[in-house]
Image: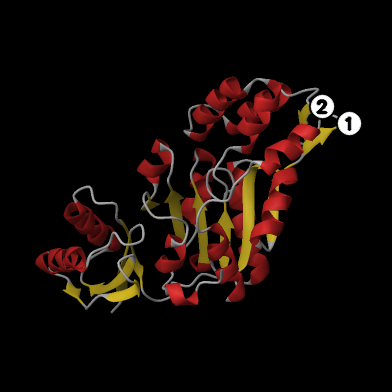
Amino acid sequence: MQHVLTLIAPAGQLPAPLIARVRSALVTLGANAGSADWLAAEEAADLPFDGLAPEQAQAAAARVFEGAPVDSIAQPAEGRRKRLLIADMDSTIVTSETLDELAAYAGLKERVAEITRRSMNGEIDFATALRERVAMLKGLALAALEATWADTHLMPGATALVRTMVANGAHCALASGGFTWFTSRVAEKVGFTSHHANLLEDDGSSLTGTVAEPVFDRHAKLTTLKQLAAELGLPLTDTLAVGDGANDLDMLAAAGLGVAYHAKPVVAAAARVRVDHADLRALLFAQGYRAAEFVA
């Protein structure tokens, strides 16, 4: 069949009767729906279908869920496995906003976090907000970077996502509005092929309160997606992007599969594909990988 609807839930929370109800809903709307193919028992399953647009299939599934913690991703069956991943870092690959956590060492976490929140929800310009927050950290000792890194944790499923895709020949890139000081470490720990972010400037002992220009913003993320695809000889349909903030919207819209992951309201509202409940392994299930194929 030409399309596939992937249903994904936290482990053990996808019962077979729910999948049967989704299939019935698709048929009622005039679709030709095949049998469920389990990718992971009670966690992820594919439903092949024809006769409906992906958006219609997702909407039908959402009506069946009735608040159950299940994500759905409908897309063409051909070309599901992507050969380029572009991922945001903060609140996507790692659980925290590293700049906010760094600001805690200057006693400014709440002030900086409020600016971050507004920026990530598209309420204020990203580059302006970044410069403002960095300026507030002028004079902060570089030891605060090490302390912040020591308390930075990976998002569940991040390592499996990246290492599985790399093992299958994909280029995986971090594209972050944060800083190379952190992206370089995350890239090495998780297994990213490359990383792209802002350069936080210092005088050798403390932060200068400045970031190198130009700021790596939403436009730079989109440019990175397009440049890497061109360098790899890939059409954009062969790419996957994931992020949670307003500065991710352009790359999510341009990628073959753009996923808003546990996203801010403005991003969740704009994205066609959302993952609200499952962890980052959902992006592997969306590509048709079975749990047995995941690289730990």
**Dot 1 crowding, Cα within 10 Å, few <14, some 14–19, many 20+:** few
Horizontally, residue 7 falls left or right of residue 60, namely: right
Residue 88 lies, in percent from the top left, at 57, 49
Q: Which residue is mark 2?
A: 208
Q: Looking at the image, can residue 234 be seen? A: no
**Dot 2 crowding, Cα within 10 Å, few <14, some 14–19, many 20+:** some
Q: Residue at x 73, y 24 (%)?
A: 137
Q: Earlier in the sequence, mark 2 or mark 1?
A: 1
Q: Amino acid at mark 2?
A: Thr
Q: CA distance from mark 2 to mark 1?
A: 6 Å
Horizontally, residue 270 falls left or right of residue 146, namely: left
Q: Nearer the viewer, residue 87 or 246?
A: 87
The image quadrant that residue 166 belongs to is bottom right
Q: Which residue is mark 1?
A: 203
Q: Residue at x 29, y 59 (%)?
A: 13
Q: Quadrant of the C terminus?
A: bottom right
Residue 197 lies, in percent from the top left, at 69, 46
Rendered view: 217 above or below 71: above
Q: Disc number at residue 215?
A: none
- The secondary structure type at the circle numbered 2 is strand
Q: Quadrant of the N terminus?
A: bottom left
The image quadrant that residue 168 belongs to is bottom right
Q: Residue at x 30, y 67 (%)?
A: 42
Q: Nearer the viewer, residue 56 or 110?
A: 110
Rendered view: 77 above or below 271: below
The image quadrant that residue 189 belongs to is bottom right
Q: How is the image coloured?
A: secondary structure
Q: Residue furthest right?
A: 204
Residue 147 lies, in percent from the top left, at 72, 37
Residue 47 lies, in percent from the top left, at 26, 72
Q: Looking at the image, can residue 89 be seen? A: yes
Marks 2 and 1 in Cβ contact (< 8 Å): yes
